[in-house]
Image: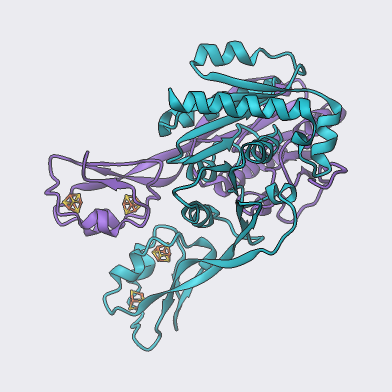
Amino acid sequence: MRIAVASGKGGTGKTLVSVNLSAVAGLDLADLDVEEPNAFLYFGDGPSTIVPVSRPVPSIDRSACDLCGECARVCAFNALVRLPQRIRVHEELCHGCGACVRLCPRQAIEEAGHEMGALVSMAQNGRRLVYGRLDVGEANAVPLIKAVRSSLEPGRTTIMDCPPGTSCNMVEAVRGSDYAIMVTEPTPFGAHDLSLALDVLERLGVPHGVVINKAGMGGVDIVAMCASRGAAVLGSIPFRRDIAERHAMGQLLIDRPEDRRTFRDLWGAVMRRMRS
Amino acid sequence: MKELVVLSGKGGTGKTTIMAALSRLVPGAVLADCDVDAPNLHLLVHGETIEEHDFTASRQAVLDAAKCNRCGTCVEACRFDAISLDDLSIDELSCEGCDLCARLCPVEAIAMNDRTSGTWAMSRTAGGIMFRARLAPGEGNSGKLVTLLKRQARRYASGSNASLVLVDGPPGRGMSGHRRAVRGRHGPAGGRAQPIG
Ligand code: SF4
Ligand code: SF4
Ligand code: SF4
Ligand code: SF4
């Protein structure tokens, strides 16, 4: 089972909810926010396995190519350019659609791997952590997000820290999840971006509920907003300086009984929603 | 004309708040909210929209169920699992617009349509002219939209002799929009004195 934790904007506490919820419930954790993964900071040290992840890009056999230019014509992303002596491949523009490979009349194109990042995994006390690490300068994170997703073990329940916003990365991460937890804060920014993210979840058909982080600040009534959108409020995390500080120092909040209760209750609410 | 870009490594560090404050300090600066995935500057800097335009950067495959003979060629060819023959439809959130299915379909049942990947707008605020844009959900062309927005902001700034363009850059270190927001110019980064900064 896959439970996505997402947010309309960055900085609302997505990682805080993911790491504490997975720890309190003893669940596996995955970080799909591959541009800036940081859930591992809360998982503890241990031996990790690092597997490079590549995406397919064309590789042209110059001895077979007659420079007809068909590949450059069919590439919808301008990743191929015909030069007088050869075809230049702009790997950073390639979406890996395979059109050039398939449509080259001389079968001169094969696919090669372009390394784009790594899949890192580790285990501790029976829990598994996996995350993607996108190489700096890679424009398209989607293939890596897919790689992290398909590395999850189907028989286990995983909490997935997803990219913020409503970009293609967020959509790719959340797509197909059994449930999504949206983390927001009661500010005008939080409300605005939550509303856009709820649109996406509705479109993807992923059942979801909302967690209000920093409850007590900002003064925007998220509960009323959720009611008007038909979204369940799963719980809230109080706006307290010590919470922000402990989280920022890389500590789990559930080490303190009152905060542990907050996340236990939250997990209880998620399970009730998923059953209903 | 100078250009100042405000960036951050992660979300929630205060980029937009700094931008809004800077815009008050430098009257007449042209503002550009290049955080096209989650534009928020307009929530702090209110204004009246003068122009609004669609942003079209890609295409989208559309299947004509009446023509399709269910041969399955397109489904097998699509690398993005966008096509379903169960309900004879193409999922617009999955389609990358590569055109391969349309080229291979033996009965020309698939057409490629322009797709609106977002919108961009120009508005008049108390602090000056602001450009902002919004990528539609699930779209991946943020880099192109950032480039377009900056070009518009620069063009306006040079036309109106504005001395400064203030750019609210996208968060994160992914290159989709970052490199384009910064290209050739530099500015401070919004940072937090924390390990998770
Ligand atoms: S389509 Fe094939 S033969 Fe023609 S230029 Fe491209 S690689 Fe060469
Ligand atoms: S795989 Fe697709 S995107 Fe990449 S170069 Fe070939 S046609 Fe272009
Ligand atoms: S255009 Fe490309 S991505 Fe879209 S449905 Fe056709 S083959 Fe798939
Ligand atoms: S290739 Fe054309 S005819 Fe064949 S299943 Fe796809 S749309 Fe239908």
Ligand 2 falls in which quarter? bottom left
Chain letter for purple, please.
B
Residue A106 in percent (x, y) is at 28, 79
Residue B95 in percent (x, y) is at 37, 47
Q: Quadrant of residue A107?
A: bottom left
Q: From what the image shows, is residue A38 above or below residue B117?
A: below
Q: Nearer the viewer, residue B174 or B144?
A: B174
Q: From what the image shows, is residue B154 above or below residue A123?
A: above
Q: Colour of chain A?
A: cyan
Residue drawn at (63%, 21%), measured in percent from left and top? A235
Residue B138 in percent (x, y) is at 48, 40
Location of the C terminus of chain A by quadrant is: top left
Q: Quadrant of residue A193?
A: top right
Q: Nearer the viewer, residue A118 or A134?
A: A118
Is residue A193 in sight in this rendering?
no
Single out the residue that lies furthest toward the front: A125
In this picture the colour scheme is by chain
Residue A239 left/right relative to A2: right
Residue A237 in percent (x, y) is at 71, 24
Q: From what the image shows, is residue B47 above or below residue A128?
A: above
Q: Nearer the viewer, residue B158 or A178?
A: A178
Residue drawn at (55%, 48%), measured in percent from left and top? B144
Single out the residue that lies furthest toward the bottom: A63
Q: Nearer the viewer, residue A27 or A107?
A: A27
Is residue B36 in sight in this rendering?
yes
Residue drawn at (49%, 46%), measured in percent from left and top? A156
Q: From what the image shows, is residue A155 above or below residue A111?
A: above
Q: Quadrant of residue B93?
A: top left
